[in-house]
Amino acid sequence: MDDDLFSKGLAKRKETLGDEYVQNNLDNADELTRSFQEAMTAWCWGFGWGDAVIEPKTRSMMNLTMIGALGKMHEWEIHCRGAINNGVSMEEIRAIIHVIGIYCGVPQSLECFRVARKVLEEHDML
């Protein structure tokens, strides 16, 4: 594994998802999941998020759209929190969910609204 990408990725991951969440994931990794956690940190967060061409806010908005389209609601909730950390507003989250509804269907947008409400209430944004 590329130690530079891992270090860069670890910093980006913590900036977006929070120190506690990331550290908990790493601390709870075992022989089954440790190599995946390390590779994901280096590849997704070091290589992907470490590319400065796309700013974190825009990248968060892209992720919400893609993860919402896939219907991976646990990950959508985590990235919704990260998006808020990266400056995405309630209005922008609403607009993203509208796009998900148009291209992925009303049931999926309703799931995103349900999760968004929970996250926005946690952040006193609703």
Image: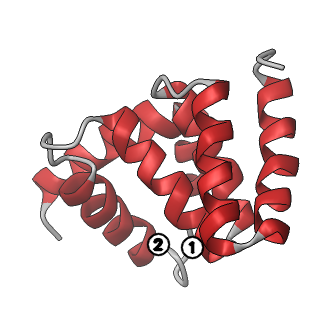
Residue, disc 1: 30
What's the distance in space between the residues labelled 1 and 2, CA to CA? 5 Å
Q: Quadrant of residue 104?
A: bottom right
35 vs 21, nearest the viewer: 21
Q: Residues within 10 Å of mark 1 (few under 14, many from 20)?
A: few
Seen at 53% across and 36% down, the residue is 83
Most extreme residue toward the front, as rendered? 102
Q: Quadrant of residue 102?
A: bottom right
At numbered mark 1, what does the secondary structure look like: helix, strand or loop?
A: loop
Residue, disc 2: 34
- Residue 87, how many percent across, how many down? 48, 22
Q: Against 19, is 87 above or below?
A: above
The answer to the question of whether label 1 and label 2 lie on touching residues, with beta carbons closer than 8 A, is yes
- Residue 58, how many percent across, how many down? 36, 39
Q: Quadrant of the C terminus?
A: top right
Q: Amino acid at mark 1?
A: Asp
Most extreme residue toward the top, as rendered? 124
- Residue 48, how many percent across, how many down? 24, 58
Seen at 76% across and 60% down, the residue is 109
Q: Residues within 10 Å of mark 2 (few under 14, many from 20)?
A: some
Q: Against 34, is 81 above or below?
A: above
| Left/right of residue 68 with respect to residue 57 in the rendered view | right
Q: Amino acid at mark 2?
A: Arg
Q: Quadrant of the N terminus?
A: bottom left
At numbered mark 2, what does the secondary structure look like: helix, strand or loop?
A: helix
